[in-house]
Amino acid sequence: MTGADAILRALEAEGVEVVFGLPGGSILPLYDAMARGTTVRHVLARHEQGAGHMAEGYARASGRVGVAIATSGPGATNLVTPIADAWMDSTPLVCITGQVRSSLIGTDAFQECDITGITIPIVKHSWLVQDVEELPHVLKAAFHVARTGRCGPVLVDVPRDVQEAELDFSYPDEVSLPGWKPPRRGNSRQIAAAAQAVAAAERPILYVGGGVVNADATAELRALAETARIPVVTTLMAKGAFPESHELHAGSPGMHGPKWSNWALNKADVIVAVGARFDDRVTGKVSAFAPGALVVHLDIDAAEISKIRHADVPVVGPLKPVLAELARELGARALPGRTDAWLAQIAQWREQFPLRYGRDGGQLKPQRVLETLRDLTAGRDDVVWTTGVGQHQMWAMQYLECDRPRSFITSGGLGTMGYGVPAAIGAKAARPDATVVCVDGDGCFQMTSQELATAVLEELPIVVVIVNNGYLGMVRQWQDMFFEERFSQIHLTHAVPDYAQLARAYGAVGLTVESEEELEGALAEALACGRTAVVDCRVDPREHCFPMIPAGAAALDVIEYAPERDAEALAL
Amino acid sequence: MSARRHTISVLLENKPGALTRVTSMFARRGYNIESLAVGPTERHDVSRITLRVDCENQPLEQIEKQMHKLVNVLRVQELVPGESIERELALLKVAAPPSARAELMALGEVFNARVADLGPDSIVFELTGSPEDVDAFEELVRPHGLRELVRTGRIGLTRAARGANRSRPKVLV
Ligand SMILES: Cc1ncc(C[n+]2csc(CCOP(=O)(O)OP(=O)(O)O)c2C)c(N)n1
Ligand SMILES: [Mg+2]
């Protein structure tokens, strides 16, 4: 068979159900092989960035490796943003790119581009396949590297002549990668030391990141939290990794986390970081973060240990068995009732510092959109959320309630505008039974809205709720708060484009909401229609996202919503 | 680990692009490389890089751990002073009018520097030694007119007495 056939047979052997891509010259042999037959479904995106984010959304919703395919040159460079996104958020991704013929490499041939060179800083590993005989092993290795250890993206660049060359295909059972040895178990002595530290704590907290979801360790996490009655904060990447309705859930820490969540994390005496990386959006000013707290850090990636915050008790290993062992060790040591006072304190902060926003009775408030979505989906276990990046994303984090892992899919580390719509399409491919809702900003939506065509034509219906404030809202907020209200290049307008009409042009349902009265009906209709739908919710552009820890400030120095602002606005 | 400068020995799969991945990681993370020497080892499929790094901004441990994550990197080991041997080769072209020649030759002899080439008004010295010896020789000949200099960057191995496998990297597991 040909190299192109071998790629498909390898994908089939890996159990790949669906790939996302867009063809072009250097990848034609692979697409020709698809036309000749494969069990793998191909979803045709309208832009390779869309294909990449779809593969990410698929991976995040399913827990499996996402696959994106593009041609050489511009096709490959269009994948760079999703690759960087997957790198920052540890999303397992295999990208397959066509490359110009081997004989042309290095000659600046048409659509030649050194994509392996360009992506070196943002992939776990990459391969430029030089001989067709290498292909089976390279693909086996690519899937293996993407999903073992800390998950992340890999790239396989295949010159056109390699796709056309003949080989005797056999897919290897094992990979030989002498330099790739992710840790297989945590050190028991370290785990015992961790248990000791947590058992002795007065105010312990579990600070949980996306690593727990990647490790499929949410059940172990819950058992651990319940065993010793430890409160849990979940980062943006871990939203849903611990049920948000659980009495031990203490919200989300970070720049726009509720004040009580940041207080819980920053006033703890022992922080157990689990698959989290002390990102600056969580810690604020590192030197002022949780002063005096002892840190237990559990992670699959040794390089995260003490990278930002010194770990007093590091445990490097796969989180599933590590958390299970820690729960066992702790079960033997933890005194019942030890954390009661601490839990009561957090509950009191929660009462004292609820999320607040303006209710001046004027325009529709963006937060109302999220509250209504939350209420309309309450109790459902078949809803998957994706978001764009900006204020709407932070409101989604604040107001939506997720009780299940993989039900909230967002671009955390890279903060990629345009992620939401294609990620939703990928998530729908992974969870055809689920209602997939993208909470998007008007700015973000315009970066990848062409993928509505993909959703409609590939029959992957999604609901897009645009929190349309007519602005690059988060930028507006920063200019307002930190640049003395000098607004610069942020106005998009509410009305151009007319999002509902645009949706209809793509064959989707388009609805416009201009007042609170219309909101619930329109959202309910979109959620129930079973088709791709866009709900354009025109909201008050003046609303800022609070609370907020300014970049570089101490996490306890929160700026809160001030009702006086509303009074002022009304008086104008 | 208070010293700022460290020598790290890295065994690397001999694959296309492997060296680029290492140097790119250093650049991206803001680690400073003072010198880098790469070459073959006793195994045809493995190369060895000897790196001299300045750890002003990042602890050595973090650098080692980031290197371990690279798929082509087989082993990372610090060459601890006293437990390892470090050498460097330098070629130095020094201005040498007949009047200065004798003195330069004498200097060279003290350092075991070989005269690799001799011209009407310059000498090319070849010196192999510890990087400190090379530094010292360089300083001594500089006043005579150091016209051109090339150094390979240090290479190193752990001492014979300590056994090849002794100093496993300190990875937290
Ligand atoms: C690709 C990209 N470009 C620029 C930014 C910087 N940025 C962050 S949030 C934001 C505004 C997003 O606007 P919108 O989608 O309307 O969301 P809103 O904040 O108004 O809810 C911008 C421009 C980004 N994160 N990603
Ligand atoms: Mg907006």
Image: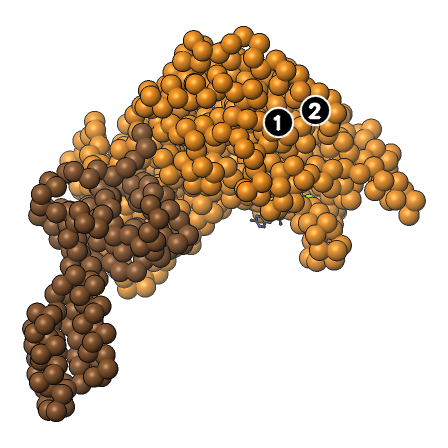
**Chain to which mark 2 belongs:** A
**Which residue is nearer to you in this view: A446 or B20?**
B20
Q: CA distance from mark 2 to mark 1?
A: 8 Å
Quick one: B46 or A187, which is closer to the camera? A187
Q: Nearer the viewer, residue A525 or A424?
A: A424
Name the disc covering residue B107, or none: none
Task: Tell me the colour chain A is drawn in.
Answer: orange
* Chain ID at mark 1: A
- Residue receiving disc 2: A349
Q: Secondary structure at mark 2?
A: helix
Name which residue type carries label 2: Trp
Residue placed under numbered mark 1 in the picture: A264
Q: How far from the left and from the top, in percent, is residue A113?
A: 35, 57
Q: In the rendered picture, chain B carries what hue?
A: brown
The amino acid marked with disc number 1 is Ala
Does residue A44 appear in this view? no
Residue furthest out toward the right: A571
